[in-house]
Image (tube, rainbow, N blue to C red):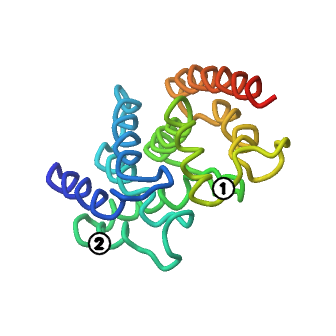
Amino acid sequence: MERVIEKAKKYVKKFSANESTGHDYHHAMRVYNMALYLSVGKDVDLDVIALAALLHDLDDKKIAVESSRLALDFLEEHVSEFIKFEVIDIIENMSFSDQKQGKKITSLEGKIVQDADRLDALGAIGIARVFAYSGKKNHLIYNDVINDDSAIAHFYQKLLGLDALMNTVEARIIAERRIEYMKTYLEEFFKEWR
């Protein structure tokens, strides 16, 4: 399976190396590495975790066309039906918007990948990703309110509450530290804004 995971890394790089919203190859690799870290000492299927972490954004509606099926195509070519089902189930149910619609992650593997993905939305890299995504989508940096679609509003609408949504203790600890950093950044932002 190691060869398949290496192929998955190259596949993700091929399709997302130049993606500019922060959902790129480097994001996939950070999620992959964090997911493996969060898996230490747990009875989980590391192959499912690795593939879900690497492939999770290839078909995301925020960045892909609606008919995109890059993850499914890769899985159909390289893994068993069981692994394909497990990975796709994670990918289709892990996002913040999926959760708001009532979808749930049931497997520990899925919860770990979800935590790793959410952690990459926090801290210094999370801040950079907010502004990359906002710029790509033509959203303002800030418009004096926190209930619009500006970059700064996104911190209050989602990011600062992600620690409470973490599934694992380890992820919650990391999230709390990264959120504290973001709060410090926001304090400085508002000082300069005013």
Residue sitting at 16 percent across and 49 percent down? 2
- CA separation, marks 1 and 2? 26 Å
Looking at the image, tell me whether mark 1 or mark 2 is earlier in sequence order. Answer: 2
Q: Quadrant of residue 185?
A: top right
Q: In the image, residue 161 lies at what x, y percent?
A: 70, 34
Q: In the image, residue 124 lies at what x, y percent?
A: 52, 30
Residue sitting at 72 percent across and 40 percent down? 152
Q: In the image, residue 169 lies at what x, y percent?
A: 54, 24
The residue pinned by badge 2 equals 76
Q: Quadrant of residue 86?
A: bottom left
Q: What amino acid does circle 1 point to? A: Ser
**Left or right: 144 as drawn, with respect to 95:** right
Q: Quadrant of residue 98?
A: bottom right
Q: For label 2, count other residues whose C-alpha is less than 10 Å away and answer few (under 14), some (14-19) or many (20+).
A: few
Residue sitting at 53 percent across and 76 percent down? 66
The residue pinned by badge 1 equals 97
**Residue 86 in the image: above or below residue 129:** below
